[in-house]
Amino acid sequence: MTRSISARTACCVLAAFFLAALAGCGGSGSARPDGPVLTGGSAGAGGSIVANGGGSSGGTAGTGSGGASTTGGCSGAPVTFQVMPAPNSVTHWCLGQPAGGCSGWFDLRNSVGSLELGGYCRVSCGTCTFEECPPIYCLGPTELTDQGVTQSWDGTYVTSSTCGASATTCDLTTCAVGQYTINVCGFPNPDPSSPDGCYQAPSTTNSSCVSVPFEYPAIAPIVVTMPVE
């Protein structure tokens, strides 16, 4: 009897396929070419058009660590988020939303709301033209092991601006500076002994979210501890 491929393996195969497609097109991940860089997860090339905080709600950037660099990124060092289970926790966590989907397992917020870390099928302020939609990929929920899960952020996010003589609405990559919050959501793994346990959780599974405030730029990792349940 032929063994069926697991859901987790299938997702990895799809991810590898799309990553290969992106590499062939000069891209490197699921973020649009002028979007932010998220290492440890989906990634995109850093943008060459970066605002110095103007017009955004993430704080007023200056010429210091939150300002734009001459090479196109933000001058603040990338910040690393480290998600860990609580010590001696008996709960095996899955990060993300039950029943799969591409919603991701965290979001970043300022005083106004969630930051848009990337955009697709939109006009780039760098070219003021509608860019071809790149291939995208997504993985399902992420298993939180005893070693934890890490994700890095380069400090950029997307805001709306205009470009050209006709003031066309476009996406502008903006440097973060000031106070932010990371919000991480997860749910109990229904079958920790299975490599596909996180994928098997029904949509009715209760989720828990943890919010941790931080200031960007940040030198030390931002640690998020999932609760004991």
Image (cartoon, rainbow, N blue to C red):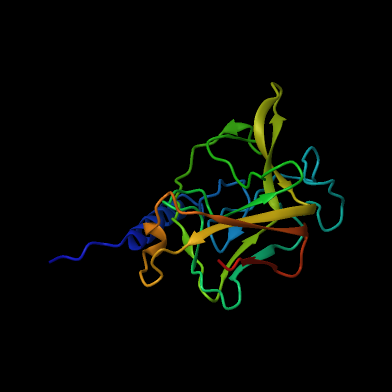
Tell me if 190 is positioned left or right of 106 in this view: left
Tell me if 205 is positioned left or right of 127 in this view: left
Q: Is residue 70 visible?
A: no
Tell me if 12 is positioned left or right of 60 in this view: left
Q: Quadrant of residue 140?
A: bottom left
- Residue visible at 82% across and 58% down in the picture: 65
Query: Residue 72 or 9: which is nearer the viewer?
Result: 9
x and y percentages locating residue 161 in the rendered image: 71, 33
- Residue visible at 82% across and 46% down in the picture: 59
x and y percentages locating residue 24 in the rendered image: 43, 53
Residue at the farthest left position? 1
- Residue visible at 36% across and 62% down in the picture: 8
x and y percentages locating residue 45 in the rendered image: 59, 53
Q: Quadrant of residue 128?
A: top right
* As drawn, 147 above or below 16: below
Q: Is residue 129 visible?
A: yes
Q: The N terminus lies in which quarter of the figure? A: bottom left
Tell me if 5 is positioned left or right of 192 in this view: left
Residue at the farthest front position? 229
Number of dots carrying numbers = 0
Query: Residue 89 or 125: which is nearer the viewer?
Result: 89
- Residue visible at 49% across and 37% down in the picture: 132
x and y percentages locating residue 119 in the rendered image: 58, 41
Query: Residue 67 or 217: which is nearer the viewer?
Result: 217
Q: The C terminus lies in which quarter of the figure? A: bottom right
* As drawn, 90 above or below 49: below
